[in-house]
Structure formats: C-alpha cells, structure tokens
Amino acid sequence: MAMNISGENKRIGLALSGGGFRAAAFHLGVMHKLKELGLLEAVDLLTCVSGGSIAGAHLALNWAAPDVLERLDNYLATMSIAVGSVIGGLLDPFATRLDKLADSYDAHLFDGATLQQLQAGPRIYLNATNLTTGNLFFFVAGGGLPAEMGEHELGTVRAEQFPIARAVAASSAFPPVFPPLKLTREEYSPAHNVDYVTLTDGGLYDNLGINPALRTRNKVDYLLVSDGGKPFANDAHPTEDSVIVLKAGLDIMMEQIRGLEFDRIEHRHKAGVGPKPLWFSIDSIEGEAQDGDAAFASSISTNLKALSATERKVLARHGAALVEARIRRYAPELVI
C-alpha cells in the first residue's frame, strides 16, 4: 500500500481520535477526502481510539466494499446506543452494560466478525487502556500479519478469533457510563501471572491514538492525525461543586495529554526519528470550508447518539476540508 514518491516508497499512517459519534462522523469526512485524493487506499496503518475505533474497524472490515463510507454514514444517522446499552445492562442479570454495547456494535456493524477478518485491510490498532498496569492495551490485526492483543509490559497473545465488536467496545467504554471489559486468562493468557485484566476507554491513555504509529515495527513516513475529540474550552462560570470538579479535572488532564502527545510527535519528527505529522483538530478554523464550521462541529456532544443530517454534513465537510488543507500545505508531494 506504500506510495512511491520521487522513486522512494513512503508509508502513510492515519490516527483516528476518540470523541463518540461526533468524532466518527468527522473521521468519515476525512476518509471521503482521502478517497477523493487517491490516498485512502494508500494508508498502511490505522490506529484508533473510542469513536475512532468505530469508524476505523468498520473501514478495515469492509476495505474493498465500494459503499463502505456510505454505510458508516447511515449507521451514524440511525443509531443511538448509549442509553439503550445502559438500561439493558441494568435490567439483564447475565450481561453488563459493556456487553450490551458490544452486542449493539456486532448487530449493526460487525455481524460476528473476528480480528482475523481484518486481514485484507491495512494494519489496524484498536486501542484501550489497561487498568491493571496503566498501559495502552491494543487489539491489532490486518496488513497480512497475525492478529494479536496485549501490551508492552504483560506481553501479547494471538487473537484471531477475538470479536471485533468486543475490541471496539473496550476501546470506547468511556467511564462511568460503561464498566471496563474484563479479560480472564481463558481469553488473554500472557507469560506474566495475572488472573485477569480490565480494559477501559483508550482515550484515558492517548485520545489521539498516536502511540502505535511511533513504534519501530510500524514505521510510517507520514502520520495524519484526525482529532475529533473534545478540546478544552474556557468557562465563564467554572464549577464550584466538589463532585462536578472531578469531571472538569478529567477534561483538563485530557487536554494536557492531548498537547503533550502532539509535542511528542512534532519533536520526534524534528529529531529524525518519527513520521511527518499532519495534525488537525475539530476546533481549527484554519482550513475550514465555511465560516462557523469549526464552532458548530466543536459544539456537538461527544456521545453515542444518532447525529442529525445537519450535524453529519458539517462534521464531514469540516473533516474533509481540514485534512486537505494540511496535506496541501505541509505535504503537497502526496497529491501532486
């Protein structure tokens, strides 16, 4: 899938951030534009978090399908699964809210598919956070290589038969709405002696999903970072409530992580040990197609509720405009 530029093969990575259905619709616009520019099929690496995992896994599973992007748009227009998953999990003594979330993904997006069925597409990472070790935990497949799951400290195991829906659910299990996904030794049996691990939303560790793209084994020359997450906004009336301040504190920590991760990829590239970063955020006005697109797109909630036609249109238009603007300004050689 590598591109030939000036006689050299160059590899492209695409990182899809968290941010619920809002982020998925924003990423959908990015995918449409990359397809239009002839770059989508050249992507060698997908690394996804939360809402980005929904979009990325659907794309990778249906890599050769001509209507793959249209089907994702229809899904985002018609599904509202957060509330149903919560209520279902509360009422069903044999399933958790997380199980219900995975069941919903499976019924409407993945139809029982396992990681092995991602082989035809690019190498894809579906990223979660391991509450056992505090590390990034990944489900990885595609690119003609074995499907695995694990992390750098505990190790990895083969995972060809692991359901895609459960991997995406783990990646998007944002607390406290959804409990973590528990993996016992029957499913994940690393060399380290642990009885089980619990996995939660990958955004708690890296909401941009860039970490796998910086691993030596995944060396890419360009890294497109589609950031559809929730940028921290100034609040004229900050909370004084001791409970709500916990949420505000989490938002501040996420913003810090966001900034540090971008600095990380920028400095690695300048040092000659990382890919050229092409990062764009949903709140960016530089490159927006129409005045107000950034403000409107950023105001949409980051949950798992169906998006209106207007919301999907603006999000897709904004994602498409930003990725094209960054490519034409910082990497025009990709589209010459």
Image (cartoon, helix red, strand yellow):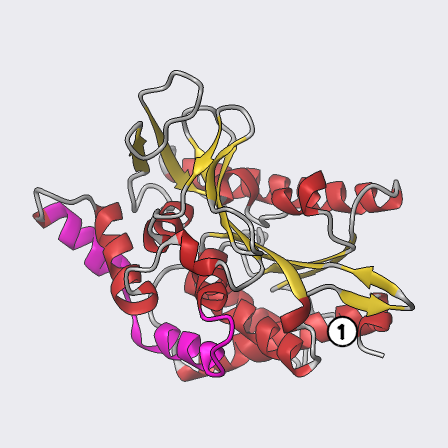
Indicate the position of residue 30 as horizontal and vertical percent values. 61, 72
Q: Residue furthest top?
A: 193
* Secondary structure state at the residue bearing disc 1: helix
Q: Is residue 253 above or below residue 2?
A: above
Q: Quadrant of residue 41?
A: bottom right
Specify whether residue 80 is painted magenta: yes
Q: Quadrant of residue 122?
A: bottom right
Specify whether residue 215 is painted magenta: no
- Quadrant occupied by the C terminus: bottom right
Residue 19 appears anywhere in the view: no
For the stretch drawn in magenta, what is the main secondary structure? Answer: helix
Indicate the position of residue 44 as horizontal and vertical percent values. 65, 60
Q: Residue at x 66, y 47 (%)?
A: 213
Q: Which residue is nearer to you in this view: 36 or 218?
A: 218
Q: Tell me if 309 is positioned left or right of 37 in this view.
A: left
Q: Is residue 290 above or below residue 322?
A: below
Q: Mark 1 sits on what residue?
A: 325
Label 1: how many residues lie within 10 Å, few (<14), some (14-19) or many (20+)?
A: some
Over which residues does the magenta segment extend?
62-90
Indicate the position of residue 13 as horizontal and vertical percent values. 67, 57
Q: Residue at x 40, y 78 (%)?
A: 71
- Quadrant occupied by the N terminus: bottom right
Q: Which residue is nearer to you in this view: 34 or 24?
A: 34
Q: Which amino acid, mark 1?
A: Ala
